[in-house]
Image: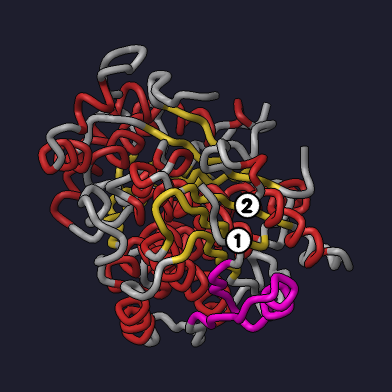
Amino acid sequence: MVATPTPVVLVTGASGGVGRGIALSCAAAGWTVWVAARRQSEGQAVADEASARGGQGHFVLCDTVSRSSVREAIATIVDHSGRLDGVVHNATSGLSPTPVQPVTMPIEDLRDHVAVSVRGSFFVAQEALPHLIASKGSMVMLTSEAGFEGKMRLAPYAAVKGAVRGLTRAWARECGHDGVRVNAIAPLATTPAVEEAFAKDPTMADRVLGRHPLGYLGDPVDDIGPVVRFLLSSDARYVTGVTIMVDGGNRPIS
Amino acid sequence: MTIDLAPWFLGTEAAGDLAAQMGVPLTLVPTEVFDEAWSPGRDLEAWREGEVNGERYDVVVVALLAPDLVAHSLAELTDDDWYAQCEGPFAQWFAALTVATERCNDRGVVIAFCDRPVPKDSGNWALTACVSDGVELMVRSLALIHEARGVRVHFVGTPARIEGKSHAQTALHDRFLMLVSGDAASMPSTVLYEGEM
C-alpha cells in the first residue's frame, strides 16, 4: 500500500479571522499548513497554534498584491515541503468593512480592493498552478454573500467578491483538464472585519442576524475551516467550479 | 408618467454602432490602458467628478464593450494583459456606472451591457468573466443605493460578441427596447444572462 503524503497547503491572509480558522482546521487534520501574511508576529503566532493542534505550522511572508512576493513565498514552500497540494486565497483589503459612497470614493481605494482580492487571486493561482498540476491539487477562493447580492454600503467589496466568483468559475473550467480543482466559499463568520463593520454601521447587526436561520455568526475554526478543508481534500475530488455558502443559511436564495 | 426613451449613452468606441442604432451620440468613457499603479486612475477620477453633476436623463445606457476580446489561459496570461483587460475595465465600469446612476432621473432606468462568457464556455475567458461578474455586483449594489428614488438598474450579460455572433448588436438593441418598454415598467432591477437557460 502506498502511503498518501500529508497535504501541504498555503493560506493567505491567515494571521487572523477566517484565514486563521482555515489554517487551524487544516492543521487539526495533521496537514502541513503555511500561514501566509504580511504581519510576521501575528502570522508566526497562528503557525505556532497550528503546530499545537497537531499539524505542521509554518509562517511565510507574503504580500499578495506583489508578484515577486507571491513567487518567493511559493518557492519557499516547495523548497521546504517538497510539494504543494492546495492554496487558499483569503486575503482581502483592509478597507473591506469600511462603508463608502461609490460616487465619492477615491479610485485609489478601489485599487486597494481590487489589488488584494482580485489581483491576489491571479498571482496566487498562476504561481501555484504548476505545483498543483503536479500534485493534482486544488484552489479555494474566498468570496462573500456580498458577492451574490451586492451591498448598499459596501459596493466595492461586493464588486471584487463577485469578480472572484467569475475567476473561480472560469479557472475551474480550464484547470480541470490538468486535474486541478478550483472552488470558492462565501463565509459569514465572527471576524475582526465583521466586528469592525458592525461597529461602523450600528444597523448592520440587526440586518444580518435579525432574519438569520441559525441566529449566530459562524466560528472561523469550527464552522468555516472544515468546509475549506473538505474542498481541499480528496473527498471533494469531484467538486469544482462551485461557491459554497457557509453562512448558516443566511442567503435569501439557494 | 411618460419617459424620454432616448438614452444618454456612455460607452467605448466598440459600442459606437450600438449608440448609432439607438440614434443617440456616444459619450466616451476614458479607457486608457491601466498598469500596476493604476496611473490613469486620477484621470478617471477627474472624469467622474466632471460628469457626475451634469444633466439628468430618464434612461442611461452603459456599454463598455472591449475593443478586442481575446482568450487567455491562466498559465500564459501576462501581467500587462491582466492590468489592461481586467483591472482597467473594472475601474472604468465602476466610474461609469456611478456617474450613470447619479445622472438618472428619479424613476428612471439604467442598463449596463457587458460582455460575459457562458459559464460552460468560460475556460480561458477568466478576464472577461471576472469583469462581468464584478460589473453585475456593481449593478446590484447601485440598484440598492438608488432604489429609494425609484431608479432601476439592469445588468445584461451577453456572450454574443465573444462567440462572434453576427446578430450581437441587434440582440442588445432588442433587449434595450424590452427593458425600457411600458411592459417592463413594473419590473424591478434585474440581471439577465443572455445565451443560457
In the rendered image, the quadrant that contains the C terminus of chain B is top right
Chain under numbered label 2: B
Asked if one can make out residue A204 in the rendered structure from this viewpoint, the answer is yes
- Give percent across and percent down for residue A213: 36, 13
Q: Amino acid at mark 2?
A: Val
Query: How far apart in space, not on screen, are marks 1 and 2 (Cα)?
Result: 7 Å
On the rendered structure, is B167 left or right of A172?
right
Q: Position of residue A82 (x, y in %)?
A: 50, 54
Residue at the spot 16% in from the left edge and 49% down from the top edge: A42
Q: Which residue is pictured at 35% across the width and 27% down the height?
A: A28
Mark number, residue A8: none
Q: Which quadrant of the figure has residue B165?
A: bottom right
Neighbor class of circle 2 (other Cα within 10 Å; few <14, some 14-19, many 20+) is many
Does the stretch in magenta take in A187?
no
Residue holding disc 1: B5
**Residue at mark 2:** B180
Q: Is residue A71 left or right of residue B84?
A: left
Check the image and name the residue furthest to the right. Answer: B166
Q: Quadrant of residue A242?
A: top right
Magenta-colored span = B7-29
Q: Residue at x 35, y 33 (%)?
A: A27
Location of residue A121 in the rendering, given as x and y in whole percent from the top left corner: 47, 58
Nearer-N-terminus badge (1/2): 1
Q: Is residue B21 magenta?
A: yes
Q: Amino acid at mark 1?
A: Leu
Q: Secondary structure at mark 2?
A: helix
User: In what element is the residue under mark 1?
Assistant: loop
